[in-house]
Amino acid sequence: MRLLVVGAGSTGGYFGGRLAQAGRDVTFLVRPRRAAELEAKGLQVVSPHGDFTLTPKLVTAGSIPSHFDAILLTVKAYALEAALEDLAPAVGQDTMVLPVLNGMRHMDTIAARFGSRILAGCLCKIPAQLDAEGRILHLSEFHELIYGELDGSRTPRIEALHAFMQNAVFDARLSLSIEQEMWEKWVMLATLAGTTCLMRGSVGEIVAAPGGSNFVNRFLDEAAATAAAAGHGPGEAFLAHTRVLLTEPGSPFTASMFRDMQKSAPIEADQIVGDLLARAVRLNVSVPLLALAYTHLAVYQNRHSAA
């Protein structure tokens, strides 16, 4: 199997790098500036599971030589349209696209461009970031990549992908309910992003404030109610775990969106919070906190766009 990883940032660089380190056929589609950086320094990963540096196979837009069997799409949502244009020459009749973007709107965008047949569900769980030197810093022990057919079937292509992903240090899991898992991650992320960005603080700081835990739980209830109205209500075990995670006293946990705001960087407000709000409105679900969070994020986003 030949895999094209679109992006060599903290997510694509980590999982693609681990696969390349394990001897898999992996090529990275990157921008010229990142290509020059990787050619000069190599792909560098600093991780609790072992540091490594490798010389990756690279292509840039306009230089993709042939179709790939699978494409792991790891760009930010606001870069999706440009990425689809760049990767189009890699898409063949039997290519499978695995997007690890947050939310669900990207699935409609990709299907509109290439057809739904090429899509598989995918999500990742990894705390990682790039440092000033372009190294990928893996910040915790967990590093999971989850994938599956959207209809839950075990097709030859997903079985081949599953075999390809094994024994590459990270945890690779084939899910027979990947769409549900993608919705559940969205519920958690929207709540984490909405609460930490709106309150400008970590989970622990919010919980320490008067009414903080109640605020987080009410926000989670709104996100979960929206998912339920869309036919993907989170399970009780997931909700119980998420409530503990997002109301843990002293927790330094924050959303990457909040960290991006602190750096005056672009954010995925439309895709993570705005799209969930839009679906709630269409489904007639009352979500006042979600609406408030999106207004707050839109002010930042509009100011950033105008800068």
Image (cartoon, helix red, strand yellow):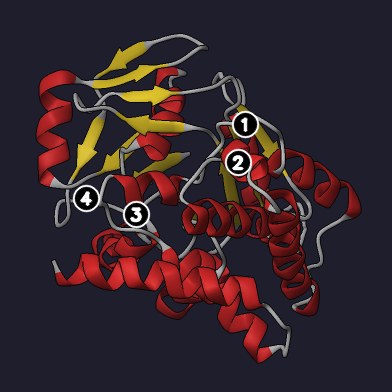
Query: Viewer-nearest of labels 2 and 3?
Result: 2
State the residue position of label 2: 203
State the residue position of label 1: 251
Residue at screen point 28% across, 52% down: 66
N-term-proximal mark, 2 vs 4: 4
Residue at screen point 65% across, 39% down: 208
Q: Percent position (x, y) of residue 234? A: 81, 60
User: Vertical placement of 100 versus 273: above or below?
Assistant: above
Asked whether disc 1 touches disc 2, contact meaning CB atoms under 8 Å apart, the reply is yes
Looking at the rendered structure, the secondary structure element under dot 2 is: helix
N-term-proximal mark, 1 vs 2: 2
Answer few, some or many: residues within 10 Å of disc 2's Cα (few below 14, many 20 plus, some between 14 and 19): many
State the residue position of label 3: 67
Q: Which mark is residue 65?
A: 4
For badge 2, the amino acid type reads Val
Q: Quadrant of residue 132?
A: top left
Looking at the rendered structure, the secondary structure element under dot 4 is: loop
Q: CA distance from mark 2 to mark 3?
A: 44 Å
Q: Quadrant of residue 79?
A: bottom left
Residue at screen point 43% across, 20% down: 23
In screen coordinates, is 214 left or right of 62?
right
Answer few, some or many: residues within 10 Å of disc 3's Cα (few below 14, many 20 plus, some between 14 and 19): some
